[in-house]
Image (cartoon, helix red, strand yellow):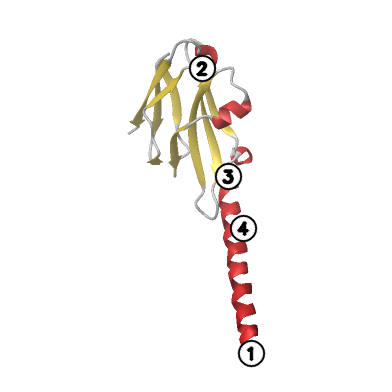
Amino acid sequence: MRGSTGANRATTMRAARRVSAGLLLLALCTGCGRSGWGPVTARVTSPDGALAAILVRTATPGSAGHVYSLFVTDRGATADEQKASHRQLAASRDSSLQLEWVDSARLRVSYRSARISGFYSEWTTCTGANAGRCRTVDIELRRLE
């Protein structure tokens, strides 16, 4: 009898660990999907009106604060298409990020002090308003003094 109780306890503990791991994964990924998009803090249209640079603030779990994510999309993209767009930049510890189109092929992101991660300096699309031809945007980072 005693051996079976220990086996049941071990099985129960393994099941509890699986449930805990699943709940932790769910909590961490809550900010990953559609509902994870926070408020849009900046939206700047390119000089030719074809593209939009969108800066979104997303709360992070715990005391980490906020992460600001930069997306570049076709201006007429739906909200779901914008959310599926590849993030070009993630920044934390700063809310002074500024977006400026230098011209229709170059976007400047300025900041005073930030922790930058996941930065991609080039965005390319061959769909949407650009169907039939590809369009590339160079993204540059500029630290303000």
In the picture, residue 97 is in which quadrant? top left
Between 34 and 139, the one lying in front of the other is 34
Distance of mark 1 from mark 4, alpha carbons?
32 Å
What residue did someone put label 4 on?
Answer: 23
In the picture, residue 10 is in which quadrant? bottom right
Which corner quadrant holds the N terminus? bottom right
Q: Nearer the viewer, mark 3 or mark 4?
A: 4
Q: Is residue 132 left or right of residue 138?
A: right
Between 18 and 123, the one lying in front of the other is 18
* For marks 1 and 4 on the same chain, the one whose residue lies earlier in the sequence: 1
**Would you call the spot at circle 4 few (<14 residues within 10 Å), some (14-19), or many (20 or more)?**
few
Q: Nearer the viewer, mark 2 or mark 3?
A: 2
What residue did someone put label 2 on?
Answer: 127
Amino acid type assigned to the residue bearing label 3 in the image: Gly
Mark 2 element type = loop
* For marks 3 and 4 on the same chain, the one whose residue lies earlier in the sequence: 4
Q: Position of residue 92 (x, y in %)?
A: 45, 43
Can residue 116 be seen in this snapshot? yes
Can residue 114 be seen in this snapshot? no
Residue drawn where x is 43% and y is 21% of the image: 124
**Would you call the spot at circle 3 few (<14 residues within 10 Å), some (14-19), or many (20 or more)?**
some
Amino acid type assigned to the residue bearing label 2 in the image: Thr
* Vertical comparison of 135 with 22: above or below: above
Mark 3 element type = loop
Q: Residue furthest right?
A: 1
Residue drawn where x is 60% and y is 73% of the image: 13
* For marks 2 and 4 on the same chain, the one whose residue lies earlier in the sequence: 4
